[in-house]
Image (cartoon, rainbow, N blue to C red):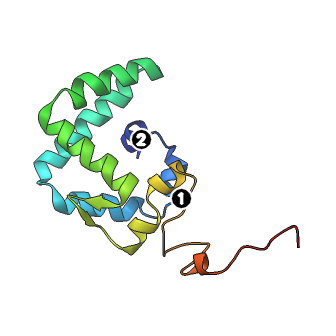
Amino acid sequence: MSISEALAGFTVNELQSTGLAETYYTYVLKSLEAATFVEFLTVSKNILENSSGEEELKKAIQSEIIGNAGMNEIAGKVITMWYLGTWEGSYINDLSYKEGLVWNLMHSHPPGAKQPGYKSWNIKPVNSNS
């Protein structure tokens, strides 16, 4: 969760509030080779433990994850998963679409999935001048 926090820019609490942390972990675990996933987690753990501040953390992520082709690919998929709810272009489940971080970032809601609700655009707004 901590590496997701650093990559996505949302707090662990915000990520957990999606209700998808365990689902995503399990999905990534099944989608990657075990050795690759363990390597990503090990690199991430080392970065988090050895970085004493925000700037040092950013530099370590840049050099050890973004600068490494294999790690960069996984990091990109993890970021996309949190923001869009997809892994390699497919939605992980219905909730992943609804809880994608992109909606929070846009101060919006997923069309057809959350308030104001399906077909709410069909109802004329109340005119405060009438």
Is disc 1 placed on a helix, strand or loop? loop
Q: Quadrant of the C terminus?
A: bottom right
Q: Earlier in the sequence, mark 1 or mark 2?
A: 2
Give the answer, above or below, for where 82 lies relative to 53.
below
Q: Is residue 95 left or right of residue 115?
A: left
Q: Tags 1 and 2 in contact by the CB under 8 Å rule?
A: no
Left or right? Give the position of 107 relative to 51: right
Q: Position of residue 43 (x, y in %)?
A: 24, 33
**Taking 41 as reference, is 10 left or right?**
right
Mark number displayed over residue 17: 1
Image point (15%, 30%), residue name = 68
Q: How many marks?
A: 2
Residue that badge 2 annotates: 2
Which three-letter amino acid code belongs to the residue tagged 1? Ser
Q: Residues within 10 Å of mark 2 (few under 14, many from 20)?
A: some
- Amino acid type indicated by mark 2: Ser
Viewed as shown, does residue 117 lie left or right of 66?
Answer: right
Check residue 29 in the rendering and tell me which mark sits there, or answer none: none
- Residue sitting at x 13%, y 46%: 36
Q: Which residue is pictured at 53% across the width and 59% down the height?
A: 17
Q: Residue furthest right?
A: 130
